[in-house]
Image: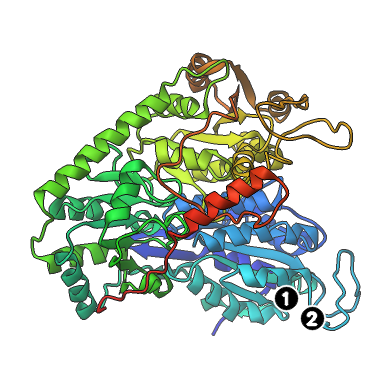
Amino acid sequence: MSEVRLTMAQALVRFLANQYVERDGEERRFFAGAFGIFGHGNVAGVGQALLEYGDDLTYYQSRNEQAMVHTAAAYARQKNRLQTFACTSSIGPGATNMVTGAALATINRLPVLLLPGDVFASRGPDPVLQQLEAPHDGDLSVNDAFRPVSRYWDRINRPEQIIPSALAAMRVLTNPAETGAATLALPQDVQAEAYDYPEEFFERRVWRVTRPVPDAAELERAAELIRGSGRPMIVSGGGTIYSEATDALRAFAERTGIPVGETQAGKGSMPYDHPLALGAVGATGTLAANRAAREADLVIGVGTRWGDFTTASKTAFQDPDVRFVNVNVADLDAAKHAGVGLVGDARATLEALEVSLAGHEVEAAYREESGKANAGWDAEVQRLYTLEHGPLPAQSEVIGAVNSFSDPTDVVVCAAGSMPGDLHKLWRTRDPKGYHVEYGYSCMGYEIAGGLGVKMAAPDREVYVMVGDGSYLMMSAEIITSIQEGHKLTIVLVDNSGFASIGALSRSVGTKGFGTQYRYRKDGTIGLDTEEEPGDVLPVDLATNAGSLGAHVIRAKGVEGLKGALSEAKGVDRTVVIHITVDRYEGVPDYESFWDVPVAEVSGMETVGAAYEEYARNRRSERRYLRGGDG
């Protein structure tokens, strides 16, 4: 067996450069490169290795450790989890900055490899700069914070340990049922230590992503339930899109007549104008989907993890005998709500299920009902797109202007605030990869970094980042990275002088928008967020800030000004920020939906007392879905 003497970091970089995945006969390199910010914990290890082997694994500079993980996760999502980035940081704050990104990746089931620097394995210079000392545990470091938010975690205390650990990390990263963040904590001395590595470790290695199908008996049980249902409904999640099952879903829906609602991650599973497409379902759902959900006697979940927004905090499905069939590659999700679990790839399972149904379809009247609901909802979307609200436009009008201007294959990116809920309801999707809203973690600050990842994954698509002022202020520096790398984004910066989403939520629970608007402190308070008490808003100029980062800035006034700005942005060759101010109080209605946010049970405030009474009424509709497939 031939060997080559390398440092642990050099061996890791060479290994990563030769990892490939294959699905449906198509091979691709798994790592598109490595993002990194260097410090004393990785500059002489992973940093040196990336410099020496830069032709094998491209290095990308970032401005914030959390942001680079978001960029990697967004890239992986756009690539349907078949490609990603490695991300390296120094020890201490550089490492812990990545923890939020790790949580986002794991919650959204997106592969990202994290390589945080760590303290000395030798413990010779302890305590080193930025080292956490734990009197009860000599092996503890801040990198242990990654354990609960990683699907794989290891600390490499000897250079040869990287061989089994790297292979184990790759198994998790390329497994659709287990994927998420994989963290290899790298002590700074071990990174630079040499070892005689076997050449076989660096050979091209292909990881097969297969399409498993469920047990035949379970398929038949599911088919029996579908044949026996009168008002079935499909809820399509992100797994539908990641497995490239949208064509199979459409064919299944058309042949059976079963209508389709979509989760945030699953939006785009069906074209918005398809007569069986009911749009968003759940707490941010459409009237069409939520009414169908309320009356459904069978719900077929495809690639969804059944988050509380999708189930409207378990109030969405009100038929007393409702049952579930869950198509999912992860048995954790397939077993939820006591459903018949079809553990398998979404595309392969839908195709197998269609064969099992042998031409079954719903009653013609039910199919026609879905078509009418689709048309009715689209009319409501058009109404909200064209409100002509003034003097400041409504956020729905901003969404309408961007959606109407964009092409079918353009991508909208968002993550947090009031915008994701409005986009879920209102964005007219025309392409499975045209809608990218991170809502598993709904992480403020994701938008611009995520938009960069989408653009790197799909350079031929226009990327529209929709971001509120609150998220923008948390993480805007990746504007610089987008300009440095030549990846143009069109950022629509919607300014409402505060946290509009939580302001509305606060008012709904009786606390009058406390702490949600940007104001001067006067008489010991920053005031309340109500239309009757507007107060003095801080003079924050976000457009000037964006210009200072190198973006081309356009200040748009009103919807017509926004339309002109979108047209102007097309001709600009670098990242554009379009700043527009909207009315924070003109929101999109809830459509017969509920989200369980507990209200104070006792309070001296009348507004809180009234909110609690409404909350208690709504909670009476919550239920547990416990009827199994045989019950």
Give me the residue at 51% from left, 59% from top.
108
Q: Where does the N terminus fall, quadrant-wise? A: bottom right
Q: Which residue is labeled 2 in the image?
A: 139
Q: Where residue 542 sits: x, y (%)?
A: 70, 27
Q: Report whether 22 appears left or right of 547.
A: left
Q: From the viewer's side, name the closer residue of 90 and 499.
A: 499
Q: Which residue is labeled 1 in the image?
A: 194
Question: Which of marks 2 and 1 precedes in the sequence?
Answer: 2
Label 1: few (<14), some (14–19) or many (≥20) C-alpha neighbours in 10 Å = some
Give me the residue at 68% from left, 24% from top.
543
Q: Where residue 92 sits: x, y (%)?
A: 80, 62
Q: From the viewer's side, name the closer residue of 239 and 293.
A: 293
| Residue 21 shows up from this direction | yes
In the rendered image, the vertical position of residue 34 relative to residue 431, given as above or below: below
Q: Report whether 395 appears left or right of 236.
A: right
Q: From the viewer's side, name the closer residue of 203 and 356.
A: 356
Give me the residue at 78% from left, 27% from top.
538
